[in-house]
Amino acid sequence: MKTVCKLLLPLLCAALLLAGCSPVDFFSTDSLLRAPRLTGTNAALQQAFEAAVGKDVFLVSPLTGEYRSAYVLKDCNGDKVEEAFVFYVRHGSENTVHVHLLEYAEHAWYSAADIAGNGSEIYKVEFFNIDGDPDQELAVTWTVSDSRRDKTLSLYNLDFAHDPGSDLFNPLASVQVFDYFVADFDKDRQNELFYVYFDSTEEKNGAYAKLLKYSEADTVLYPVNEVKFDGRASNLLAVKYDYADGRYEFYADCAVGENSYYTELILYEPETATLSLPLRALYEDPVAQTRRSSLLYADDVDGDGRIEIPVERNLDNSFVINYPESETVPLRCVSWLRFGQEGFTTTVTYYVSDAYGYRLRLDPALGALYIINDYMTGEVQFRSVESLSGETNEGDESAAPDDLLFTVSPAVRARTAAPDADPAADAASKLRIVVTDFGRSRNITRKTVEALIETVDA
C-alpha cells in the first residue's frame, strides 16, 4: 500500500502543478472539495468573490461549449474591461446553482449582483445581443442532475447602468429547450431566438420549433410563430442548421418509437418571416421520406457545405445471402438527400457495413451496380448490371462470371472488431480488396476502391 501511495503522490502533484491558474472546471455540486486558491491577478478576484458569498461553496462548471470554467470573464458592456461571472452552489443548500457577477474598477474587483439559477448543473454558457442595445446578454442553459435531457435556457439582460435598488440581471426569457440558435433571421439588424423542444405534457405532447423576437416597446421576447413536428416523433436526437438560397434551414433528427428515426425539416420563410415545415406540402407522408432503421444523422456527408438527410433504400437486384433463418434478404444502401425547391435529390449513395465498420461510396464512375453480400463470410461482391440477362433470382450466385468488378471482405473474418482495434485506423487497411480482370478493363484499381471506402462506427 505504501508503494502505491508513493507512486501516486508524484502524479497527483504534477496534476496540481499543471492546473496552475487554469479554470477550476473539475468541480461539481456533489464534490467534497473547496475551490483552490487562485494566484496572481486572479487571487484578488477570488478574494472579492469569497468576501461576498463566503468560502463554504462549491464551484460549478459548464458541461459543454466555449466557456468551460466556473469563472467566466467577458466584456459584456463594451468598456474594454472584463466582468467576471462565477457559478457556484452553497454547501448544504438545495443544490441550485447561483450566478455571481463581479465588476472591476479602480484596480479592484467588487461584487455587483447575485441570482439563483434554474438548475443544479450548467449545460452551456453563451453571450449574444438580442435586444439591440450595446450590451451583450447572458444565456445560461441549465439542467437538473437527474434529468439532463430536460434543459432550460435562461436569457438575462445585463443592465450595467441600473439605478440603485434595481436589478442588474433582468430576465428576458426562460424556456425549455433541446437546442437553440440565435441569428438575425429577418435582416433587421436585431437577432431572433430559434429553439427546438419536446413537451411531454398531456396537453401539448410532442416536438416543436419556435421563433422569438425582442419587442423594444415591451422589453420582452414574444413568439413569432411555432410549428409542431409530426405526431409520431417520440424524442429529439440532434439539430443542425444550414443557410442556403437566402434562408435558414434546420434539420432535426427524431426518434419514432424504438429503432426507427426520421429527420424533420424546418425552414425560415423570409417572405412571411415565419417558420414552416415544407415536407408536409410536398409529400402525403413526410416522415416516410426520411424514415430509417439505423441511427444516422443529417450531416454534410459530401463536404460541400450543405446538409443532406440519410435514407435507407433497397438496391435493385441486390441481396444478402446466407442470412440466419432465411436464404436471402434484400440488400439496403444509404442514400443522402438534399432538399431543394422541388423536393429531394440524391447526392451520394453508400453501401454500409455496420458489422465491419466501413462504408463504400457507390460512385457513378463505377457504372450501374448490383451487390451480393455473404452474411457468413463478410465478402461483398460488386457486379455490373450490364451483364444481367433478364431478371436476377434472389440469392442466385450463378450470375455471369464476367460481371464481377471487385470484392471487399474483412482481412480477419470475424463479425466483431478486436477489443484492442484502433478505431481511427484507415478502414481500407482492415479489408481485403480484390479487383477482377473485368474490373480492371473498366479502369478500376485497388486504389480506386480504397478511395471510396470510409470508416464508420461499428
Image (cartoon, helix red, strand yellow):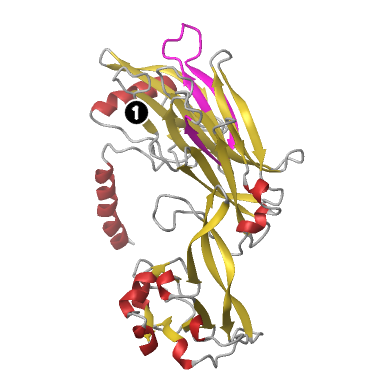
| Residue located farthest toward the right when viewing the structure as drawn | 202
The prevailing secondary structure element of the residues shown in magenta is strand
Give the quadrant of residue 213.
top right
Number of marks: 1
Residue at image mark 1? 73
| Residue located farthest toward the top when viewing the structure as drawn | 164
- Residue at x 39% of width, y 68% of height: 454
Crowding near the residue tagged with mark 1, few <14, some 14–19, many ≥20 C-alpha atoms within 10 Å = some
Position of residue 287 measured from the top left corner of the image (x, y, whole percent): 66, 54
Give the vertical position of 235 relative to 32 (above or below). Answer: below
Give whichever of 120, 350 is nearer the camera: 350
Position of residue 340 measured from the top left corner of the image (x, y, whole percent): 53, 49
Give whichever of 44, 340 is nearer the camera: 340
The answer to whether residue 319 is seen in the rendering is: yes
Residue 258 shown left or right of residue 151 in the figure: right
Q: Quadrant of the N terminus?
A: bottom left
Give the quadrant of residue 333.
bottom right
- Residue at x 45% of width, y 26% of height: 138
- Residue at x 66% of width, y 58% of height: 288
Secondary structure type for disc 1: strand
Position of residue 276 measured from the top left corner of the image (x, y, whole percent): 62, 39
Give whichever of 204, 373 is nearer the camera: 373
- Residue at x 58% of width, y 40% of height: 196
Q: Which residues are magenta?
A: 155-184
Position of residue 354 measured from the top left corner of the image (x, y, whole percent): 50, 71
- Residue 171 is one of the magenta-drawn residues: yes
The answer to whether residue 56 is seen in the rendering is: no
- Residue 152 is one of the magenta-drawn residues: no
Amino acid on which the number 1 mark rests in the picture:
Leu
Give the quadrant of residue 271.
top right
